[in-house]
Image (spheres, coloured by chain):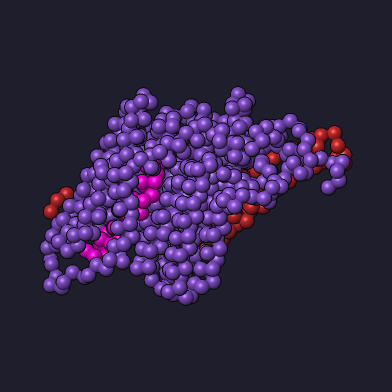
Amino acid sequence: MEPVFALLTGIFVAVAVYLLLSKSIIRMLLGVAILGNAVNLLLFTSGRILREVPPVIGAGLDVPAGATANPLPQALILTAIVISFSFFAFLLVLSWRAYRVLGTDNTDGMRVAEPDDVQPPPLGY
Amino acid sequence: MSSRRRLDTDSMAVSSSPADLSAALVLQPVAALDWLVILPVAWCISIGAILMMIRYKGMAQPLVAIFGLAVLVALDAGLLWHVAQSGPVTMVMGRWLPPFGIAFTVDLTGALFALTSAVVALVGAVAAIDDVNASGRRYGFYPFLLLLMAGVSGAFLTGDVFNLYVWFEVLLISSFGLLVLGAEREQIDGAVKYGFLNLVATTLFLLTTGYLYGIFGTLNMADIARKAPGLQSVAPLVTLTALYILAFSMKAAAFPVNFWLPASYHTPRIVVSALFAGLLTKVGIYALIRIGVMLFPAEREQLGLVLAIVAALTMLTGSLGALAQSDTRRLLGYLVISGIGAMLAGIAIGGPDAISGVIFYAVHSMLVMTALYLAAGLAARLGGGFSLGSAGGLYRNYLLFTALSLMLFFSVSGLPPFSGFWPKVMLVKAAINGDASWLAAILLLSGFLTMIATGRVFLLAYWRPVETQPAAAPQPLAFSALLPLLILTVLSILIGVLPETLLNLAQQAASTLAEPSAYLHSVFPAGGAP
């Protein structure tokens, strides 16, 4: 199973990077969302999907029949989902506001904070 | 839990060593002083919540916030004293023994950084009385400040890599709130760049932590430091370290990934810029020290040359960028970057001498960069804005303020007798002893360029007489407006004149990082188990 998940994670990351390199804020937002999910999948996979040895229970003792999962990555992913969701929400609102205020969703056009036509500092007085 | 069943380790790398439940829990009560480990974070969150409730009460807010931050300074000072007396201290959440429970482990490095950041935040809160108006208060400046401090303190005090990620996110989301406070055009523009690039950096941090967990099966820093030497030949630790260095360099604004900083740091209210310059990038440096020096020293050494080149380029782009700016706030943003380069140079050289220089430099940089932004804000209020093209005339009317600013300019350039001098001496010395004389040369060159840039600010904004002098008398400068600047400048002079205490602390902190047996013993008192 792990190789399949590893490939899937790789595709997710590639798609996210492609979208993040775009100049359109909306595409970048989609990239952020996909990147968050790629990382969640990676955390899930790096905890090993099915384990030979169930967690917590000692060696040679009664174990549940059937496969068991590792609980820790799930806790990590839960935290990461909450965080990435809140960041996505903030960035979504920020982008909408930027579109309203700056009148563009093209990052090349966002030069208000760093104007192109700045005079160099005077060399003397 | 039946007595027949036993607990085993959850980690993949460790052989099974059965232990019963009582052995997996901390059963003795926590010593009273050890509560200091968690108190700074819990205190900040509580005061932040209270401030959120009273955010429509204009005058009560700064009072509660300043009281809260003063207590935070006291707590962090107590923690530093406790750690200096009895070595690293650990407290574990939920009474589970490490590596199961999330550990908060404080050593000298963390305690020193936490104390300095608390002092900076306290000064920032005092400065904000004047700088943040009623609407800024209503939009939650003070709650965000306290939550930012919760994140910063948590990052400095935690002993768990994933927990470090969580505190990074706490401080990042609070910094978003502070950055867009007021929602002006420039702020929105800066916040878009700051937001996206920092989010990518923390996501990269999380991604690397996923790999770390896949390799080690644990997230506890002490456990990782213990296991890393045994896995060097079988696991891709250099790749892991390189990814961490990239992620934290982005947070710290190192050269190729620093463009979010000059794009955003000049946009918010000046006190917010001051706090950001003092606190945020240093958290990245702290994480780099923790990962690169304590957890993966051998791997960091392999990447030493890359780090050194990045450090040199960061120093040069920072100080050259500062030379090219005509807006004082943007100029200071580049000086922040240049300082980050100096600290990276120390991390690249490695060894206790260089690392103690880095720790010293970080303390100096937190105090002085905050002070410089506050000075720039005050200068703009008194004499004609942030642009070097039009500002001037401060020397004639505000002598004390001019003197304080000049001292800060000397301090940031690394001239004696101010706090910037000693860390630069330590770093240059370590660079020469570490066969990296070229890095020492660049350290000195960057200091020289910084001197030119800040000297020009002094010449133009302070010394130059204003040509079109209006007949109006200069507006009076209240002592309360000068107080935050005065505190930070006095601290900088004190550190410069009497460096022994801080020097000893930094050296001890660096030796604990290089030889983390005391740190490990604090987390795993029994030595062997599990």
Which quarter shows the C terminus of chain B?
A: top right
Left or right relative to B272: residue B237: right
Q: Is residue B171 magenta?
A: no
Foreground residue, B2 or A110? B2
Check if residue B382 falls in the magenta segment.
yes
**Magenta region's main secondary structure?**
helix
Residue extending farthest to the bottom is: B57
| Above/below status of B93 relative to B13 | below
Left or right: residue B247 versus residue B456 is: right
Q: Which chain is purple?
A: B
Q: Which residues are magenta?
A: B359-386
Say if B39 sits above or below B436 in the image: below
Residue name at image x 38 percent, y 39 percent: B503
Q: Is residue A66 visible?
A: no
The residue nearer to you, when weighing B349 against B172, is B349
Which residue occupies 33% across, 51% down?
Answer: B491
Q: At 52% from the left edge and 38% from the top edge, which residue is drawn?
A: B291
Question: Which residue is found at the position 43% from the left and 40% from the top?
Answer: B505
